[in-house]
Image: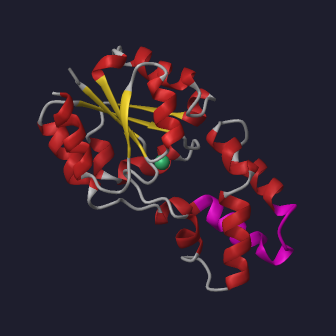
């Protein structure tokens, strides 16, 4: 019997589209290309998610690879990108429906410490019973230890959990601990169908 639903954040609850976010700051095509790649698709982003560096260290590292004219924009995006990290509108009603049906809800996210700055701006997170944030654990999905942190912290049984993530690798990571799940494809009604099929 499923009692707990675990949600990934990026591209499940919030719309994580780095290029779209960078475009909120500039229409200089070269700047968009460079900053999108160097901020969001390079080693510092992963190290931030892993909690191994802070934003000033990330800024210094990124600046080694970008033109000097982009330093101010780089700093601005690094500190404010989350203002453009917006909800996927169709997910919230499904989260609310599951909450109303009595499921406990959790978020398990690969995210930097900045998560604590922006997460309460989203109503879906107000419905959550708990959070595990990679930077705070110094562990990234799909490392099995981060799923174990969630199970241990909230005293959950793997077989009573259902996990939703847009990454197949993360769903496979959870499966290794006996947590069933769904690779999210953007259609939240499939979450309800999948949970109903397990009842
Ligand atoms: Mg995701």
Image quadrant for the C terminus? top left
In the rendered view, tell whether residue 118 sits above or below residue 76: above
Task: Reply above or below: 66 against 99.
Answer: below
Magenta-drawn stretch contains 69: yes
Picture quadrant of residue 90: bottom left
In the rendered image of this protein, does residue 151 appear above or below residue 66? above
**Is-magenta flag for residue 74?**
yes
Q: Position of residue 53 (x, y in %)?
A: 73, 41
Between 24 and 1, the residue placed more toward the observer is: 1
Between 113 and 124, the residue placed more toward the observer is 124
> x, y percentage for residue 15?
43, 60
Residue 66 shown left or right of residue 192 in the figure: right
Q: Where are the magenta residues, as a range?
A: 63-79
Q: Position of residue 179 (x, y in %)?
A: 39, 24
Left or right: 49 as drawn, with respect to 6: right
Of residues 150 and 2, which is closer to you in this image? 2
Q: Is 166 drawn above or below residue 197 in the view shown?
A: below
């Amino acid at each position: 019997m499923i009692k707990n639903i675990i949600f990934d954040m990026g591209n499940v609850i919030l719309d994580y589209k780095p290029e779209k976010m960078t475009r909120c700051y500039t229409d200089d095509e070269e700047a968009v290309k460079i900053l999108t790649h160097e901020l969001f698709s390079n080693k510092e982003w992963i190290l931030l998610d892993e909690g191994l560096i802070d934003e000033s260290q990330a800024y210094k590292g990124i600046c080694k690879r970008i033109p000097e004219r982009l330093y101010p924009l780089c700093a601005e995006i690094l500190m404010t990108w989350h203002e453009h990290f917006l909800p996927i509108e169709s997910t919230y009603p499904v989260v609310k429906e599951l909450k109303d049906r009595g499921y406990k809800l959790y978020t398990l996210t690969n995210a930097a410490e900045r998560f604590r700055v922006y997460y309460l701006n989203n109503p879906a997170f107000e419905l959550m019973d708990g959070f595990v944030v990679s930077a705070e654990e110094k562990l990234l999905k799909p490392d099995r230890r981060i799923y174990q942190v969630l199970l241990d912290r909230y005293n959950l049984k793997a077989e009573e959990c259902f996990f939703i993530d847009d990454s197949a690798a993360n769903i496979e990571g959870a499966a290794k601990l006996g947590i069933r799940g769904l690779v999210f494809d953007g259609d939240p009604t499939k979450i309800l169908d999948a949970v109903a099929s397990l009842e």
